[in-house]
Image: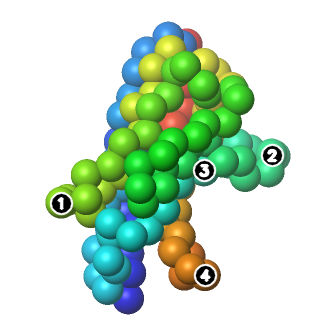
Amino acid sequence: QVQLVESGGGLVQPGESLQLACVASGSITFPIYDMNWYRQAPGKQRELVAAMTARGSTSYGDSVKGRFTISRDNAKNAVYLQMNMLRPDDTAVYSCNAYYGGLDFWGKGTLVTVSS
């Protein structure tokens, strides 16, 4: 069994920052997994926000480039998403995903609400 648990969501005002964390536990060799952050806003399709390969290469969705940063700590089986300059359209449930060779695990997500 593999579990991914996200934390760090909440209500913030536009322009503020949040850091999300996702910790993996169970039968997972964390360092070999590509780790991704997705989000889904109400009434919209899920979109890829940020990705980090096992080798450390990163990529970002166009709407978050320059504002969000993904990082990982393999010693802690954790991946993080630093979100700066948050905007109301960043409001969504953020979920982390671990992928390796057809193995695909998801967390339940954490809600981020950006509102004044």
The reply to whether residue 109 is in sight is no
Q: Amino acid at mark 3?
A: Tyr
* Badge 4 or badge 1: first in the primary sequence: 1
- Indicate the quadrant containing the C terminus: top left, top right, bottom left or bottom right: top right
Residue at image point 50% right, 15% down: 85
- Indicate the quadrant containing the N terminus: top left, top right, bottom left or bottom right: bottom left
Marks 1 and 3: which is nearer the front? 1
Kindly identify which residue carries mark 1: 75
Residue at image point 60% right, 19% down: 87
The quarter of the displayed image where residue 50 is located: top right
Kindly identify which residue carries mark 4: 102
Spatial separation of the CA atoms under disc 1 and disc 3: 23 Å
> Can you say whether 16 is above or below 43 in the image?
above
Could you tell whether 107 is left or right of 62 in the image? left
Kindly identify which residue carries mark 2: 44
* Badge 2 or badge 1: first in the primary sequence: 2
Q: Amino acid at mark 1?
A: Ala
Marks 2 and 4: which is nearer the front? 4
* Badge 3 or badge 4: first in the primary sequence: 3
Spatial separation of the CA atoms under disc 3 and disc 2: 12 Å
Image location (x, y in percent) of residue 73 = 25, 52
Residue at image point 64% right, 21% down: 88
Spatial separation of the CA atoms under disc 3 and disc 4: 18 Å
Marks 2 and 1: which is nearer the front? 1
* Badge 1 or badge 3: first in the primary sequence: 3
Image location (x, y in percent) of residue 109 = 50, 56
Q: Amino acid at mark 2?
A: Lys
Q: Residues within 10 Å of mark 4 (few under 14, many from 20)?
A: few
